[in-house]
């Protein structure tokens, strides 16, 4: 893949990565001050027409806060090969794991940021990497029933997710409920895609043990990647909330002083 000189000047390396029988379009953004590098953030776009380049501004904000930032297009999206209909939740996890294992420095703490469908992928990665994951950023996240894991999106997946209340069986909620790191949930005040009950369930699960912040923006819509791109102040607030040091769990449970 041709490298963009301007991107190189901004510390962004763009490249192709063979994975899962596909060729994925990827980028790695270096921290603004490499000597103060803190962790690796992984940005995961949503479904449909989403792609990782719309998250470039967020990647820059996280790099400015000391993070290496890894982004990529899932197969069937953006500059990656493949068909969207042949993708599945299982393949999304396989592709994300391959990118992280190849391009995040070994042993780095991981900050996982997922938009919409990638709420489920963030949970799947958290279950896989365990204590290595120190922070979650969930933007209008979706979660899915366990039986939605295998079917390709064009063959069986839609039937599962259209079953009323099927999402309540999601393993993602169990993962969020036991997570003890930093967690930020960013949602629009009115989401026309994610049912309110899903958002409430995710918030309740994250609030169980995580150091949790819930951000709601009245002027936003479900496409939060695009919205954050065009709203630098709110994007900076999200980045600040995400990288804030984790408050010890016992201290979170102490009542506020009168």
Image (cartoon, helix red, strand yellow):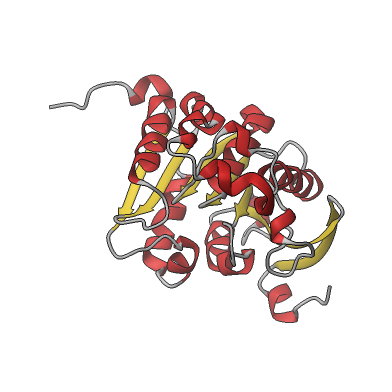
Q: State the residue lying farthest toward the bottom.
A: 5
- Residue 250 image offset from top left, x and y in percent: 38, 19
Q: How many marks?
A: 0
Between residues 156 and 133, which one lies in front from this camera angle? 156
**Rendering quarter of residue 22:** bottom right
Residue 38 seen by the camera: no
**Rendering quarter of residue 78:** bottom right
Left or right of 142: which side holds 219?
left
Between residues 182 and 251, which one lies in front from this camera angle? 182
Q: State the residue lying farthest toward the left.
A: 258
Q: Residue at x 34, y 49 (%)?
A: 215
- Residue 51 image offset from top left, x and y in percent: 62, 65
Residue 102 seen by the camera: yes
Is 88 drawn above or below residue 3 in the view shown? Answer: above
Left or right of 38: which side holds 212?
left
Is 242 drawn above or below residue 27 in the view shown? Answer: above
- Residue 258 image offset from top left, x and y in percent: 12, 27
Q: Residue at x 28, y 21 (%)?
A: 254
- Residue 21 image offset from top left, x and y in percent: 87, 53
Q: Can you say which quadrant of the picture contains the N terminus?
A: bottom right
**Rendering quarter of residue 235:** bottom left
Between residues 34 and 86, which one lies in front from this camera angle? 86
Q: Residue at x 56, y 64 (%)?
A: 55
Between residues 84 and 258, which one lies in front from this camera angle? 84
Left or right of 213: which side holds 128?
right
């Amino acid at each position: 893949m041709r490298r963009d000189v301007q991107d190189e000047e901004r510390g962004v390396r763009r490249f192709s990565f063979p994975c899962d029988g596909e060729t994925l379009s990827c980028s790695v953004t270096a921290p603004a001050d490499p000597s103060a590098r803190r962790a690796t953030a992984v940005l995961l776009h949503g479904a449909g027409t989403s792609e990782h380049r719309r998250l470039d501004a967020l990647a820059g904000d996280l790099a400015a806060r000391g993070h290496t930032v890894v982004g990529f297009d899932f197969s069937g999206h953006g500059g990656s090969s493949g068909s969207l209909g042949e993708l599945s939740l299982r393949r999304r996890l396989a592709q994300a794991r391959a990118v992280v294992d190849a391009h995040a420095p070994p042993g780095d703490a991981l900050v996982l940021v997922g938009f919409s469908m990638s709420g489920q992928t963030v949970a799947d990665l958290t279950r896989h990497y365990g204590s290595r994951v120190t922070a979650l950023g969930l933007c209008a996240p979706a979660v899915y029933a366990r039986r939605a894991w295998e079917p390709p999106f064009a063959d069986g997946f839609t039937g599962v997710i259209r079953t009323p209340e099927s999402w309540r069986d999601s393993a993602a909620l169990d993962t969020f409920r036991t997570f003890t790191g930093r967690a930020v949930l960013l949602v629009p005040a009115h989401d026309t895609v994610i049912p309110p009950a899903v958002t409430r369930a995710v918030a309740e699960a994250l609030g169980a043990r995580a150091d949790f912040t819930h951000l709601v923006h009245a002027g936003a819509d479900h496409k939060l990647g695009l919205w954050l791109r065009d709203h630098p102040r709110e994007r900076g607030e999200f980045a600040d909330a995400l990288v804030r040091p984790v408050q010890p769990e016992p201290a979170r449970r102490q009542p506020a002083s009168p």
